[in-house]
Image (spheres, helix red, strand yellow):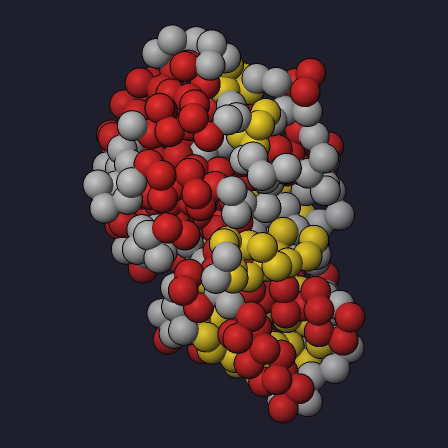
Amino acid sequence: MTSAVNDGRSRIIDAGPYEVRISSGLRSEFASIIATVAPAHSYAVITDDNVGPLHAGPLMAALATHGRASLHVMPAGEAHKTRDTWARLTDDLLAAGCGRDTTVVALGGGVVGDLAGFVAATFMRGIPFVQVPTSLLAMIDASVGGKTGVDTAAGKNLVGAFHAPAVVLADVELLATLPVEHRRAGLAEAIKHGVITDAGHFAELSETLPDLLAGQPAATLAAVARSVEIKSSVVKTDVREHGLRKTLNFGHTIGHAIEHASGYALLHGECVAIGMVLEARLAERLGIAEEGTADRIARVLKRAQLPVARPESLSAEQIVAATRLDKKARSGSAEYALPARIGEMANAESGWSIAVADAAVLEALA
């Protein structure tokens, strides 16, 4: 993994077919970079009704100097990451006169990025798009990797496509407007990256949590950059998730099940935090993980003020039933990416994931 720029205030990370640019104050360059990397006759900015009022105005004005610019706003929240919203947005793009010479710009968190990316992947059979993440979770994880999609009544991210962005532009100063609970939720994915491949990153995150929770720019930029390096390195090795990329699903099989079963009452990062602890406990019960791995993960998550236990409102049976709907399920059984210890995942010889019987999962959840 190489970074073309690393001057302490900015990073440019090679993510394979595109770059991830991370900086403080990068928003002043958003439009010029977009026009250079993904030039178009028109630019369609997709955002939500939380982010739009905060950040869309300057971007729209700057893009208008490079071509036609149209703004398309969706309701905020995972509950709106649906095919209905996708259909409305594609109709809106058509009504705005967008064609194959359009670049979609996703301005927002993970929900906006996933949905706008899916719009771009399917509109006119595929047009360029740019990720401009505004949440910590999106900067650290959701904007990188080329996965796009929507949720359905049956489960999360069950309809989608792989569609790589032309570039990812992350300005950590935009996180100043991010509610603290969303900052905490984003840290769950960073902690996950430490667990799956880098014990040093895990330890550093634990040490710098106070600065990260306070939104300190230098600490945030360093954490975002290292997480992007980790995810990009994994994804470049296995773009379509046939092997190593499965390790990025640690915490997500149970986490997604909790999200879905709760009706998305919890933030994605909160569900992943719970999922990591429960899946690590499962790994210990199966004799896969070193004893104490789950407790080490739980201690750091608690310091980040994230939940680590199954919600009392959900039974173990409800969660297990929801895991069977996961897109990673095979032959009716959910597959799990499980740790061997902090910084190392297990099951390399079996493709980095393992099908676990429901009875074993029920015991871990109980």
> Relative to 185, is 111 above or below?
below
Along the line of sight, which residue is nearer the eye, 329 or 288?
A: 329
Answer with left or right where residue 218 lies relative to residue 10.
left
Q: Quadrant of the N terminus?
A: top right
Tell me the quarter of the picture where residue 63 sits: bottom right
- Name the residue rendered at 28%, 44% in the picture: 314
**Relative to residue 143, is residue 134 drawn left or right?**
left
Q: Nearer the viewer, residue 244 or 236?
A: 244
Q: Is residue 10 left or right of residue 259?
A: right
Q: Is residue 102 left or right of residue 152?
A: right
Percent across and percent down for residue 329 are 59, 39
> Residue at 50% across / 57% down in the picture?
154
How many labels, in total? 0
Could you tell me which quadrant the C terminus lies in?
top left
Measured as percent of width and height from the top left, residue 348 is found at: 65, 18
Is there any visible trace of residue 41 in the rendered image?
no
